[in-house]
Image: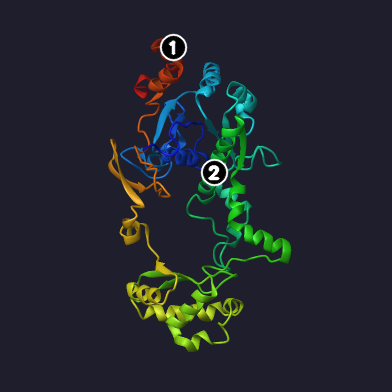
Amino acid sequence: MSALLDGLRVLDMSTMIAAPTTASLLADYGAEVIKLERPLTGDFVRKFGAQKQGQGLYWKTLSRNKKSVALDLHLPETQELMRSWVKKFDVVIENFRPGTLEKWGLGPNELLTANPGLILLRVTAYGQNGPYRDRPGFGTLAEAMTGVASVTGYPDKPPLLPAFPLADVMAGYLGASAVLAALYRRNSSSEGEVIDLAIYEALLKVIELQIIEFDQNGTLHKRNGNQLEDTAPRGAYLCGDGQWIALSASTQPIAERVLRAIGGEQLVQDPRFRTNLERVEHADALDSMISDWCNKRARNEAIAELSQMGCAVGPLETVDSMFDNPQVKARESVTTVSDPDLGPVRMTNIFPKFSNATPTLRAAGPALIGGDTVDVLQHDLGLSEEMLRNLLMPKTSSDNVK
């Protein structure tokens, strides 16, 4: 049984999180992804965040299923090689500052002249045009610029930036869908494509309701903690055993079930809570009632009672307790990969599940910078060992090439 993207070849020239997430998703689905790294120092993510035994942990999961090739794109001989090598790929992913590829003679015109069917994904903070085009930027600035941070947090506190790379990962998923759409079109047209992805635009999708609300009604949402201005009840509630649950009642039937569970039919008929608009208006009072009800029960007891009534409720886990969540375990949402450097490593599995294809995690991110350079370049370009030595020795030690 073949993988979903068996035979697809991807050159990942990008770094950090957003664009490499696109490459990681394609690798998960079976594409052969060649990760291009800087000689000696490698990708920035190798040293980003937590490490163990000198190995970057984010690198291990973000670069899983990828091969590592180390080349210095600043060198004219590497740039010349790229014009030939690009013919061997279906997709190229890059996230250099706008104009960088053009400066190296590797812009879209040159790459698509060499390979007319190439799909070139260009990921930047702000896109290839506009007044912010040349500014450096990360996902954090997208979370700020789009208004996401302004409506996240509590009204008496400053705007809250996410504690995880929300914009980068959203952009990575959008990049993957755009690449696959372009590949689908190429099947009938044989034409390549240049995709201009701005990280901030990926995040606008998250707040599209607030955008149209402001345009049509002049509504400007504010920070509201765990509550929503559009629906109630919704929040995190502390139970009597010190553990938390999360509850959401975004439809009238679900809201009535919650009311019935915590206060019987009398609460369902309470004029403060009969409609969603009334519940939103009296959200603090409703939250207080739910909190009091939860405080008198252990978490499992609260979840059981609410679930029995058909409410949308679940445990609010920490990362360590999430590993033991029975739903996570049943679906193998977290799996174990055997890594030659760290041994067994648990990381997220490949999502979603498919009925016929069986995507597999073949390996964690490679430890050796450029460990696949010789094998890949010999296979793709037929370079002799002497040619490879001349290409690699100026910037790459022999220890980094196998």
Under circle 2, the secondary element is helix
Residue 166 point in image, percent of width and height: 51, 51
- Mark in the foreground, 1 or 2: 2
Left or right position of 389 against 22: left
Residue occupying the far top of the picture: 386
**Quadrant in the rendering for residue 398:** top left
Q: Badge 2: few (under 14), some or many (20 or more) residues near its Cα, within 10 Å?
A: some
Give the quadrant of the C terminus: top left
Left or right position of 390 against 139: left
Mark 1 and mark 2: Cα distance apart in space: 38 Å
Left or right position of 325 against 267: left
Left or right position of 281 against 236: right
Q: Amino acid at mark 1?
A: Met
Residue 213 point in image, percent of width and height: 68, 63
**Render colour scheme:** rainbow
Can residue 43 be seen in this snapshot? Answer: yes
Q: Badge 1: few (under 14), some or many (20 or more) residues near its Cα, within 10 Å?
A: few
Task: Name the residue rendered at 59%, 33% in the picture.
Answer: 188
Q: Amino acid at mark 2?
A: Ser
Which disc number belongs to residue 177? 2
Which disc number belongs to residue 62? none
Q: Taking 136 as reference, is 258 above or below it?
A: below
Q: Are marks 1 and 2 in contact (CB under 8 Å)?
A: no
Give the quadrant of the N terminus: top left
Residue receiving disc 1: 387
- All told, the count of numbered labels is 2
**Quadrant in the rendering for residue 58:** top left
Task: Name the residue rendered at 54%, 40% in the picture.
Answer: 180
Residue occupying the far bottom of the picture: 266
Task: Name the residue rendered at 52%, 18% in the picture.
Answer: 81
Residue 85 point in image, percent of width and height: 51, 21
